[in-house]
Image (cartoon, rainbow, N blue to C red):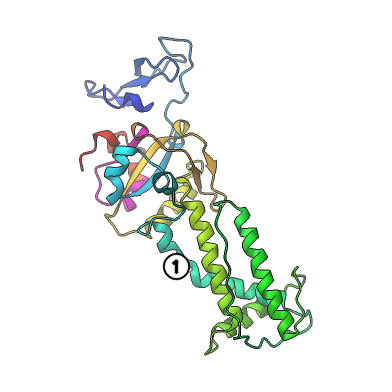
Amino acid sequence: MPNVYTNTPFDCPYCKTHDLHLYKCLSCTSVSIFDTKAVPQACPQCPALVRSPPFKDSDWLYHIAPRSALLSIQANGLRSVYSRTRRREPEPSGSFVADREKRIEKIVKERLSAYVAHLDTNANLPDLPNFPVIQPTILFDYTASQDDYARLKYHELEWLGLYARRKNIRFQEEIKSFRRMEWKTKATALLDEPEEHYLTLLAKEAANHHFGIEGAITASYVYFLATDNVDDMTIAFNDYVKLRAPGSYVVLRVWKYSVVGLERDQADHRAVRTQADVSRENLQIMIGTQNPGSDFVRLRSLWNHWIPLSQWRG
């Protein structure tokens, strides 16, 4: 029978009331027919316990995939960019690039505010004359680990310390005062200067590396919406699809216990991720809607809006 190899329930095609499910035991791999009103505690063919309740909404993980990549996923399963290409760079057409464009200015301003804080004398913010002689440049290879952020900060402080010494401004590696509004105001003034300030150039260089590190990490994992909190999942889904044109994506799901090496995304608690490939046999696709963005919450729990990805024909 179709679908039973995915470790998920399949409504019996001969039962018009949908009271029967086909169920595949993960231990003995035999297929049984269960009455949904009286699910047994153990597999009829072996002592293995039946998952109880067998198929909760929170047992699923959801992945939003570009429609253009669907044939590749159908053939090879879900794989990280690094697994497919051996490159630690996110897909140019993926949501990461769109998200970067949306956030880059904010990251630059945050870094400039931090630089001002490091140069704060705790009495009055010093004048920050430009230093056009040197172009701050940061070079290092990304390892796709959180340690790269510490390496980036080390390089930033080196360039910031050089500026402070050349301009005879006191520099503190640890920020001890808390004058955030003043720092933001000063950072805005630096951004508005007609000639790009040394500190602005450093902030832009660091922001590009920030996204380079983030991109290298993103390229190393397959990501899913976490389903342990429905409200968080819904908000995350809406945030994600805002970055994509309507009709350009599809929604996939996988039973979470079939995913190897699942871990919480350190950058976003609403997501989980894995470095392992996800087999095509374990994937299902949402059907029966032209607009999954608006229909996701309503349709995700309905059995007749999901089919195995292997059965999808576009």
* Residue at the image point whose x is 35% and y is 47% from the top: 296
Number of numbered callouts drawn: 1
Tell me which amino acid carries mark 1. Answer: Lys
Q: Measured from the top left, where is residue 252 in percent x and y?
A: 35, 42
Q: Is residue 291 magenta?
A: yes
* Residue at the image point whose x is 63% and y is 82% from the top: 186
Q: Measured from the top left, where is residue 100 in percent x and y?
A: 46, 64
Badge 1 element: helix
41, above or below 55, in the image: above
Disc 1: which residue: 102
Q: Measured from the top left, where is residue 312 in percent x and y?
A: 24, 38
155, above or below 254, in the image: below
Q: Measured from the top left, where is residue 196 in percent x and y?
A: 54, 84
> Which range is magenta?
282-297
Q: Is residue 53 visible?
A: yes
**Left or right of residue 85: residue 307:** left
**Left or right of residue 112: residue 105:** left
State the quadrant of the N terminus: top left
Density class for disc 1 (Cα within 10 Å; few <14, some 14-19, many ≥20) is few
* Residue at the image point whose x is 57% and y is 69% from the top: 206
State the quadrant of the C terminus: top left
* Residue at the image point whose x is 58% and y is 68% from the top: 138
| Between 134 and 121, the one nearer to me in the picture | 134
Q: Is residue 179 visible?
A: no
Q: Is residue 41 magenta?
A: no
**Left or right of residue 219: residue 111:** right
Q: Tell me where residue 74 sits by quadrant.
A: top left
